[in-house]
Image (cartoon, helix red, strand yellow):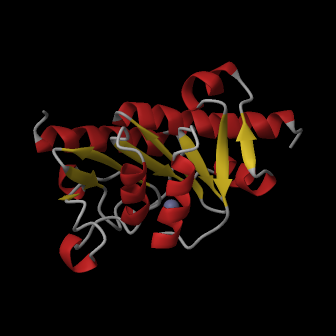
Amino acid sequence: MRKANDVRKELVKRGRQLYAAGLALGRGGNISVLERGRIFIKAAGVDMEEALVKDYPDVGPEEALSESKHGRVSTEIPMHLACYRANRAIKAVVHVHSPELVAVSALTKVLESNSYEFDCLLGRKVPVVPFIEPGSDKLGRAVAKKVSESSNGVLLARHGAVCFGRTLKEACDRAMALSRACRLYLYLEGR
Ligand SMILES: [Zn+2]
């Protein structure tokens, strides 16, 4: 089992990669890892580009939904917690906002595989959930329902996407693959 500080260091590194790849802007987007029975997640109000080790606090699953107990973690903690509870194999969650993700979420109800890369990293399809207030428990419940539908990510209408994996690298690769698949969808549709 890794030390807590090593978990945080990986979150710092991957958060910067996602930001550099254009998957997040400003304080948007957030990532987490479930390890040592704790959820390590980006703090609220911090850019992934600038976040340091101290900006990835950890909370227990039972404290995650109580603001008075978790204090300053990302407002999107309900969605992260819902993913971990929906599938015990999930150990990392990546939530990002790129324009391609948002565009495709407005054009289809489900994104079917459109490339070999999609097959390898995302499975056969990625469902879309309608717009629901970001940070709400309701959004967490809607995402959790889709987690079990044999996909490795979910598009969130007018918002972005959430991807999951057994490791943070796997979840990040899936988020990048989903953003690329959405760009490809737009090319193929002539948009
Ligand atoms: Zn968001």
Query: Can you give x and y, in whole percent of width and height, for residue 162 in the image?
Result: 51, 50
Quadrant, the N terminus: top left
Q: Residue at x 46, y 56 (%)?
A: 29
Q: Position of residue 118 (x, y in %)?
A: 64, 27
Q: What residue is rendered at 55% in x and 43% in y?
A: 153
In the picture as drawn, the residue positioned furthest to the bottom comes out as: 68
- Res 164 quadrant in image: top left
Res 47 → quadrant: bottom left
- Tell me the quarter of the image containing the C terminus: top right
Q: Position of residue 45 (x, y in %)?
A: 35, 68
Q: Nearer the viewer, residue 123 or 51?
A: 123
Q: Is residue 111 left or right of residue 62?
A: right
Above or below 98: residue 130: below
Q: Residue furthest left?
A: 3
The number of callouts visible is 0
Would residue 99 appear left or right of 175 to someone viewing this image? right
* 112 in relation to 106, above or below: above
What residue do we see at 30% from left, 45% from top? 33
Give the residue at x 45% y 71%.
Answer: 137
Give the percent coordinates (x, y) of residue 156: 61, 57
**Is residue 136 visible from the viewing direction of this image?**
no
Can residue 171 be seen here?
yes
